[in-house]
Amino acid sequence: MHEKKDSGKKEEDSKRMPIFGSWHGAIPFGESEEEREASIKEAEPKKIIRHLDTPKGKIVIENYCSPEKLESLSIDDGICMFSRHDPERQKRALVTVSRSDCGNVIVGIKDSTIVSYIGIHKPSERERWGKPKYPWLFELGAIEVSRNYRRLGLAQAMLKVAFDDPYYEDKIVLTTGFTWHWDLEQTGLTKYQYHDLGAQLMGRFGFIEMATDEPNVTMDSANLFLVRVGKNVPFSRYQKFASLLFANEWEAMLRGW
């Protein structure tokens, strides 16, 4: 659908960072940024369980799935893209995320079997996003629907459960989409079509594309780098996050960060 030569302007337009004038967290008159930061009352994580009726039966969508529950569930053999075709390996990874500090595993469960999942966690300290240890910065590390349960609306249903939780409204959540993790063979999509599909889906939940010089992102022009800035995020947090986008000082200076 998209040729690489046609993607340049589109990528440039889509990856612009929000301009100051459109900032949704504008500081009220007479209130300093420090005062606003201090006044933020962090919401408690909200447990959400919903049911999705599909042609394959009812699927339970649940956030904050506990390690104990995850261990008790089986995992569908169509879960394969992040685990190198080893679903049990992926299940162990989900248990690890669930046990981590502020880790959140959202799952789709059909008859005691995991058929889809999302993992949200703190960025790794080995990556630029995790090195400052900002408590308000999170990463949506993976989203996958089993090959056996696609086109049922599971990805959208899980994202809705994830971000109906007010806990993330004073947080920034980033996510990356790398072409080498995409199931292009089974979907029949080109990598640029998959890019557009991912950006469109995540955009429904407040994610926008941003530019960065992170090498894993820039390795392929079809890779995705998406960021969700919660509606209650003060501008000081956004500034701190934006300072991480470019390690190249010249590039950062050109962009005003």
Image (cartoon, rainbow, N blue to C red):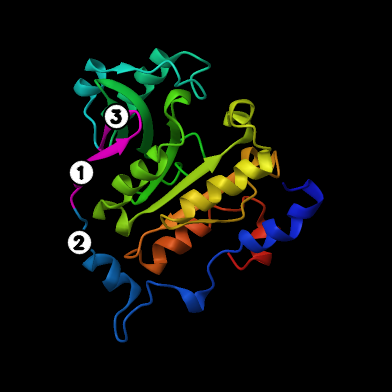
* Residue 110 point in image, percent of width and height: 28, 25
Amino acid type of the residue that numbered disc 2 sits on in the rendered structure: Lys
Q: Residues within 10 Å of mark 1 (few under 14, many from 20)?
A: some
Residue 89 colored in magenta in the image:
no
Decide: is 81 above or below 204: above
Sequence-earlier tag: 2 or 3 = 2
- Element carrying mark 1: loop
Asked whether the beta carbons under mark 1 and mark 2 sit within 8 Å of each other, the answer is no
Range shown magenta: 44-63
Q: Residues within 10 Å of mark 2 (few under 14, many from 20)?
A: few
* Residue displayed at 51% across by 15% down: 85
Question: How much space separates mark 3 and mark 1, taking CA atoms?
Answer: 20 Å
Sequence-earlier tag: 1 or 2 = 2
29 with respect to 244 (left or right): left
Labels in figure, total: 3
Determine the image quadrant of residue 27: bottom left
Secondary structure mostly seen in the magenta stretch: strand
- Residue marked by disc 3: 57
Sequence-earlier tag: 3 or 1 = 1
Q: Is residue 124 visible?
A: no
Amino acid type of the residue that numbered disc 3 sits on in the rendered structure: Gly
